[in-house]
Image (tube, rainbow, N blue to C red):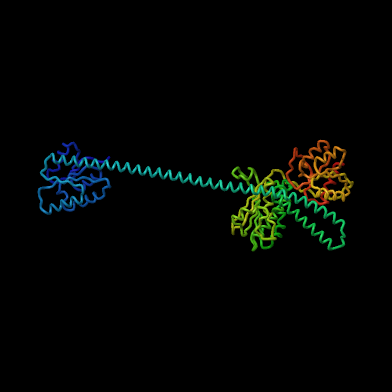
């Protein structure tokens, strides 16, 4: 607690004792100081005023007191009552002026003093000092209020900044989600368009390939010009078939033969082919992060996808570089919205090439988009890889920046079962016994071409151009050995026809001809399928297999 009361400095005579008595009579405490140093000690502790004899400040005694006065806080103006003598010589007058200048809040009492004068002066100084303390209290309260206000403002500012940042982040997330949704909708729309075009194109290629095969049997094989023209036409049709398969892969409507596959063995078996494809300027590194589970994938399609990615990487590194193919087991969580939670093998293909800017990266998986220039690519490589990954139940991620290369990540679903052995190719041979075939296709051009292929193989063909027509023919007594039906037909699909036929003829072989992977029907059943466009040999092999199985 700070000291209170009157500090008395009167080291000569009886002034100290007289002042102490008068101060106590006024109801105030007092403390007598023997010198200026002792007075300063008590001033540091507190006090209401100082009653000082003039002679105590002679010489250099006032200097330390002046220093203390100058160091007072802004609210403080400590009162001094100086007891003087009746001596009014100039040097004393000048000394008293110096006291006022140095100590500031000064009043003078001339000795001998009346008691009432001293007590009135002391009480007045006491009240003045009390007001100074009140001012200090008020200023401290104001300071605390200002500090508290600044603290509250700072807290509110931080809260507003955090809320603003959260709003900005939410806006960024919404923009990213909207962009992703728009991209997904665009790709879905393009997929539907591309899938439909590819399906119709497959039908046209079916007619072209079938008629070319039949024509090959009729022309003069000894004429090199005719043989060359026929070979060119057939090669163009095969390239068209490859193109439609890539389009269907992008649309996620290609025919997949998925099975448990050891991806590490598949990649190692492809290393020689990849080395030859990328050339001597590119170093190929294959890395596997520990034992890997099997993945559920069509191995042939995965090999094609991996080769596509390797060729893309080669084209991105014209001056050479490193192609890294890495495999590791990963877990997808709910925080990865593009993937179902579970175990995956992530297959990464990374190059050290020129990379892509943000605008190119955003369009990289669009069909027919290519940066390779005219005549150097179809722009379907990444589209096909993206479609394969998603159709297989996995995911596709593309990372790239200019000058930093490109990395493609394929997330392939892991399975616990052992890899399935590759099935040996079925022998291709002509039918031992001519069969009666019910051919169902709504497209007359395809029906006529396929019928010609079948008749050339020695089969008897009955044509129906809709599922309903085929059912009527069966009800009228037609007894075919096998039914070959298109899948995509108006009114009744090939699957719907198969379901209806199986109810009446449960053992009748049915071969579904389609370029689509998904088979939608009233009650989908397991059916053997042949992918369009097919050759005469493939068609013959499937009919022979199914009819022979039925005969046994």
Which residue appears at 85% of the width and 54% of the height? 214
Front in this rendered view, residue 520 or 314: 520
Which residue appears at 61% of the width and 58% of the height? 355
Return the x and y of residue 321 as percentages of the image width and height: 64, 61
Front in this rendered view, residue 370 or 128: 370
- Horizontal side of residue 107 vs 137, given as left or right: left
- Horizontal side of residue 465 vs 248, given as left or right: right
Return the x and y of residue 115 as percentages of the image width and height: 12, 39
Asked if residue 89 can be seen in this view, the reply is: yes
Front in this rendered view, residue 39 or 446: 446
- How many numbered discs? 0
Task: Indicate the quadrant containing the N terminus: top left, top right, bottom left or bottom right.
Answer: top left
Which residue appears at 27% of the width and 45% of the height? 75
Asked if residue 552 can be seen in this view, the reply is: no
Task: Indicate the quadrant containing the C terminus: top left, top right, bottom left or bottom right.
Answer: top right
Return the x and y of residue 133 as percentages of the image width and height: 26, 41
Front in this rendered view, residue 265 or 332: 332
Return the x and y of residue 296 as percentages of the image width and height: 70, 46
């Amino acid at each position: 607690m700070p000291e209170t009361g009157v500090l008395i400095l009167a080291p000569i005579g009886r002034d100290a004792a007289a002042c102490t008595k008068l101060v106590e009579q006024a109801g105030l405490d007092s403390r007598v100081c023997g010198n200026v140093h002792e007075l300063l000690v008590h001033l540091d502790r507190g006090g209401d005023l100082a009653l000082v004899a003039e002679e105590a400040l002679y010489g250099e005694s006032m200097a330390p007191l002046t220093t203390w006065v100058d160091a007072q806080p802004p609210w403080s103006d400590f009162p001094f009552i100086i007891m003087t003598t009746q001596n009014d010589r100039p040097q004393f007058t000048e000394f008293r002026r110096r006291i006022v200048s140095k100590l500031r809040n000064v009043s003078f009492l001339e000795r001998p003093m009346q008691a009432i004068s001293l007590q009135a002066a002391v009480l007045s100084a006491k009240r003045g000092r009390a007001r100074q303390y009140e001012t200090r209290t008020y200023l401290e309260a104001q300071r605390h209020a200002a500090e508290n206000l600044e603290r509250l403002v700072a807290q509110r500012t931080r809260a507003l900044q955090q809320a603003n940042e959260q709003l900005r982040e939410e806006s960024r997330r919404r923009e990213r989600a909207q962009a992703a949704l728009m991209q997904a909708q665009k790709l879905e729309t393009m997929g539907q368009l591309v899938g439909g075009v590819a399906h119709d194109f497959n039908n046209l290629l079916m007619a072209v390939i079938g008629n070319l095969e039949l024509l090959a049997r009729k022309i003069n094989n000894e004429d090199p010009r005719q043989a060359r023209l026929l070979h060119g036409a057939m090669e163009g049709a095969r390239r068209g078939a490859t193109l439609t398969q890539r389009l269907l892969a992008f649309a996620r409507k290609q025919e997949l033969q998925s099975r448990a596959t050891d991806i590490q063995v598949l990649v190692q078996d492809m290393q020689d082919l990849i080395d030859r494809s990328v050339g001597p300027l590119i170093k190929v590194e294959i890395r596997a992060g520990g034992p890997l589970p099997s993945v559920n994938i069509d191995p042939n399609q995965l090999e094609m996808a991996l080769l596509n990615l390797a060729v893309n990487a080669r084209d991105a590194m014209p001056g050479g570089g490193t192609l890294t193919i890495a495999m590791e087991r990963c877990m997808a969580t709910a925080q990865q919205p593009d993937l179902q939670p579970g175990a995956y093998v992530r297959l990464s293909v990374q190059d050290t090439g020129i990379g892509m800017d943000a605008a190119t990266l955003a369009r990289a998986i669009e069909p027919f988009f290519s940066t390779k220039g005219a005549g150097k690519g179809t722009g379907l490589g990444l589209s096909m890889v993206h479609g394969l990954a998603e159709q297989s139940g996995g995911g596709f991620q593309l990372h790239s920046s200019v000058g930093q290369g490109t990395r493609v990540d394929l997330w392939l679903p892991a399975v616990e079962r052992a890899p399935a052995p590759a099935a040996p190719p079925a022998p291709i041979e002509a039918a031992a016994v001519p069969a009666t075939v019910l051919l169902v296709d709504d497209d007359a051009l395809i029906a006529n071409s396929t019928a010609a292929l079948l008749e050339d193989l020695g089969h008897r063909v009955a044509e129906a151009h809709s599922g309903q027509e085929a059912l009527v023919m069966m009800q009228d007594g037609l007894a075919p050995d096998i039914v070959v039906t298109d899948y995509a037909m108006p009114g009744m699909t090939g699957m719907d026809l198969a379901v209806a036929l199986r109810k009446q003829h449960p053992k009748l072989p049915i071969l579904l001809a389609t370029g689509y992977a998904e088979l939608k029907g009233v009650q989908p059943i397991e059916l053997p399928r042949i992918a369009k466009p097919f050759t005469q040999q493939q068609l013959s092999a499937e009919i022979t297999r199914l009819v022979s199985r039925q005969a046994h």
